[in-house]
Image: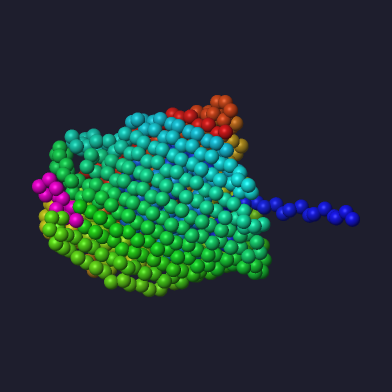
């Protein structure tokens, strides 16, 4: 007897993405950066693309070609004043920040291999919410549906700069695999303006490479496994032969996604990092330089994971329950006190931090036009293994030995919001939130110097605790047009800042002698930094034309008492009042291009508001012309007007510049 034909096998679809965002996420202020925009910036660097979101700033205006990597933390809403990142940065759900110092290794991320970035402003209570006191940046990798099967690119630029990259994207059984690599180098520019230069000043050359592999495989009808690994190496010389940095690392992660009746996301990751830096003191006439510090090895390791469940509750609810854990440890090994042509002291400074948290979050669509959302976290935190040990390099005798007892505690945070759509295309929203951040081992245990200034560590630092409210609207009059405006009030209690406690000449705890003109500072918890502000984002697309703009105005103020009382009412360092960005672009089958104008408002380089960093406006441009069978030529220009963008001002008035005019010409092939 003939048997009936077997039913067709269910189609297995893998995406390489996370579980979809809950409906209630729209109640918070969010901005998305598209793949085309990420790949089309004049610099070709991810941190440049992120500047499209006004109010999103790094501690320094220099980028990953010339900055000290440890200054490249990122924050939002003018809660700056500290080099560690106050925003949570995730790549495919994995935290990116360095486990020891909290900076983001931007040079390791190729924006051309990303599908997009979603930026949520304000504190967070979801997965890995510990650390999201200013906001969350979610970076997502692209898959074969967005990447060419084969891609190769090479470009040459000003000052003997070169970029080369390549990638593969292929279907693999029922899944896919992507592989990519990138190399950058350049002779760089002189950081100091011509009028202030001396014979010791040279160009800030750089060299970096990065490679990544990612595989997504089906392991069931509604389940996929995502495995990723990346490695990077970055060397920079910061304007003096004796000053530079080396950072390298390798990260790996495994993520399991199930999209059945029960949504499941399970993640585990490991980070291994190594960092080194060299510093020097420069004579007043800038004719000679002397080594001052050799941070020759700073190994760090990060481990973590999460488990998130979305049970099948009523159709009006998006409920997620989860747990997550993070552990970071690192130790800085340094040579210092340079005397008679050699270092005479050694230092070891480091420790560990950890969080273990549980959270619950629900979105409830109580009507077609109204969505409510609320979430809460409970975190157990621990700071341990803290030490600052200094000894004589000849005798081995200890000159400083500080061992810090472990401490721990519990911290609860929450967030909630509402979204009302009274008319098609119009959404009114409001939200309130809280969050916290642990100080990094670098902030807790490692003293440091910048020029004539010296800053002591503080193993007694407490948590940063954020709270805020916001309200705004999203208006979409056309499917391709959007306007979003948000007003907010934020407070960061216990904000960590470098507080001036004395002036040189003199000898101070941990740092020793500080010369005349220099400042002695220590990392302290301020009473609070309060900010009120307004953000506006707009975009429109008409045919092949696109335009987007972002504007942020903020009024940040310090609340301080005790040792920091002199800062009360001042603005926190590295916190501009206004920032803006606008991009105009066009695309056609063969031709595309864009113009981007950015304005960086004035800010202060120090806690006492004595060193003012001037405002600056830059213009960038890029253009692409398709030639033949996937081959195209690209031209890019950074800072066309060669505006002087000041990144820092030292105690003696010496200026540190960001990227000057830089021109690029390259070829790209997509097969």
Q: Residue at x 65, y 51 (%)?
A: 13
Relative vertical location of residue 178 with respect to residue 261 in this rendering, above or below:
above
Membership of 344 in magenta stretch? yes
Q: Is residue 519 left or right of residue 167?
A: left
From the image, which quarter does the N terminus lie in?
bottom right
Relative vertical location of residue 391 with respect to residue 596 in this rendering, above or below:
below
Question: What span is colored magenta in the figure?
Answer: 336-346
- Which x, y percent locates residue 506? 11, 57
Membership of 244 in magenta stretch? no
Relative vertical location of residue 455 with respect to residue 50 in this rendering, above or below:
below
Q: Is residue 390 left or right of residue 33?
A: left
Give the farthest residue toward the top.
627
Q: Residue at x 53, y 65 (%)?
A: 307
**Residue 575 seen by the camera:** no
Relative vertical location of residue 548 with respect to residue 419 in this rendering, above or below:
above
- Which x, y percent locates residue 605? 28, 51
Name the dominant secondary structure of the magenta segment. strand
From the image, which quarter does the C terminus lie in?
top right
- Which x, y percent locates residue 433? 47, 66
Q: Nearer the viewer, residue 231 or 608?
A: 231
Give the farthest residue toward the right.
1
């Amino acid at each position: 007897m003939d048997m009936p034909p077997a039913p067709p096998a269910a189609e297995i679809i893998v995406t390489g993405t996370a579980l979809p965002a809950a409906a209630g996420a729209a109640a918070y202020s969010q901005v998305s950066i598209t793949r085309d925009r990420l790949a089309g910036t004049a610099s070709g660097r991810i941190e440049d693309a992120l500047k499209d979101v006004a109010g999103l700033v790094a501690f320094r205006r220099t980028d990953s070609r010339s900055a000290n990597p440890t200054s490249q933390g990122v924050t939002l809403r003018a809660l700056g004043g500290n080099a560690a990142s106050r925003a949570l940065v995730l790549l495919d759900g994995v935290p990116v920040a360095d486990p020891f110092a909290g900076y983001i290794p931007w040079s390791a991320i190729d924006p051309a291999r990303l599908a997009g970035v979603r930026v949520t402003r304000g504190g967070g209570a979801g997965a890995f919410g510990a650390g999201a006191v200013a906001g969350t940046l979610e970076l997502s990798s692209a898959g074969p549906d967005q990447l060419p099967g084969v891609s190769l690119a090479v470009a040459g630029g000003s000052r003997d700069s070169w970029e080369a990259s390549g990638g593969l994207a292929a279907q693999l059984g029922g899944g896919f695999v992507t592989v990519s690599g990138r190399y950058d180098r350049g002779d760089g520019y002189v950081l100091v303006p011509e009028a202030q230069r001396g014979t010791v000043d040279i160009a800030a050359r750089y060299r970096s490479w990065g490679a990544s592999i990612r595989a997504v495989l089906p392991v069931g009808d509604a389940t996929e496994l995502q495995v990723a690994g990346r490695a990077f190496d970055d060397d920079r010389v910061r304007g003096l032969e004796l000053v530079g940095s080396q950072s390298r690392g390798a990260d790996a992660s495994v993520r399991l996604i199930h999209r059945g009746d029960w949504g499941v996301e399970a993640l585990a990751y490991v980070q291994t990092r190594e960092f080194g830096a060299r510093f020097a003191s420069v004579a007043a006439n800038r004719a000679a330089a002397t080594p001052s510090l050799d941070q020759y090895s700073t190994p760090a390791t990060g481990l973590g994971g999460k488990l998130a469940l979305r049970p099948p509750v009523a159709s009006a609810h998006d409920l997620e329950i989860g747990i997550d854990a993070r552990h970071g440890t690192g130790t800085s090994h340094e040579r210092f006190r340079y005397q008679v042509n050699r270092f005479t002291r050694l230092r070891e400074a480091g420790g560990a931090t950890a969080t273990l948290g549980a959270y619950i979050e629900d979105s409830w669509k109580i009507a077609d036009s109204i969505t409510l959302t609320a979430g809460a976290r409970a975190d157990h935190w621990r700071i341990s293994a803290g030490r600052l040990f200094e000894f004589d390099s000849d005798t081995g005798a200890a000159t400083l030995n500080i061992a810090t007892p472990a401490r721990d505690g519990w911290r609860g945070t929450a967030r909630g919001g509402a979204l009302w759509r009274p008319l098609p295309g119009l959404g009114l929203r409001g939200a309130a939130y809280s969050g916290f951040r642990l100080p990094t081992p670098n902030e807790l245990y490692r003293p440091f110097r910048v020029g004539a200034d010296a800053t002591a560590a503080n193993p007694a630092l407490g948590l940063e605790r954020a709270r805020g409210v916001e309200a705004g609207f999203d208006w979409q009059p056309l499917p391709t047009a959007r306007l979003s405006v948000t007003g907010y009030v934020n407070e960061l209690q216990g904000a960590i800042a470098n507080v001036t406690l004395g002036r040189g000449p003199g000898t101070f705890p941990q740092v020793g002698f500080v010369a005349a003109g220099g400042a002695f500072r220590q990392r302290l918890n301020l009473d609070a930094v309060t900010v009120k502000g307004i953000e506006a984002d707009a975009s429109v697309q008409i045919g092949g034309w696109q335009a987007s703009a972002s504007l942020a105005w903020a009024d940040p103020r310090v609340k301080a008492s005790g040792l920091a009382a002199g800062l009360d009412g001042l603005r926190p360092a590295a916190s501009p009042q206004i920032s803006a960005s606008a991009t105009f672009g066009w695309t056609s089958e063969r031709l595309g291009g864009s113009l981007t104008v950015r304005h960086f408002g004035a800010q202060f380089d120090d806690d006492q508001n004595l060193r003012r960093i001037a405002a600056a406006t830059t213009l960038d441009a890029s253009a692409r012309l398709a030639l033949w069978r996937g081959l195209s030529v690209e031209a890019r220009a950074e800072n066309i007007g060669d505006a002087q963008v000041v990144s820092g001002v030292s105690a003696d008035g010496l200026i540190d510049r960001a990227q000057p005019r830089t021109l690029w010409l390259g070829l790209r092939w997509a097969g």
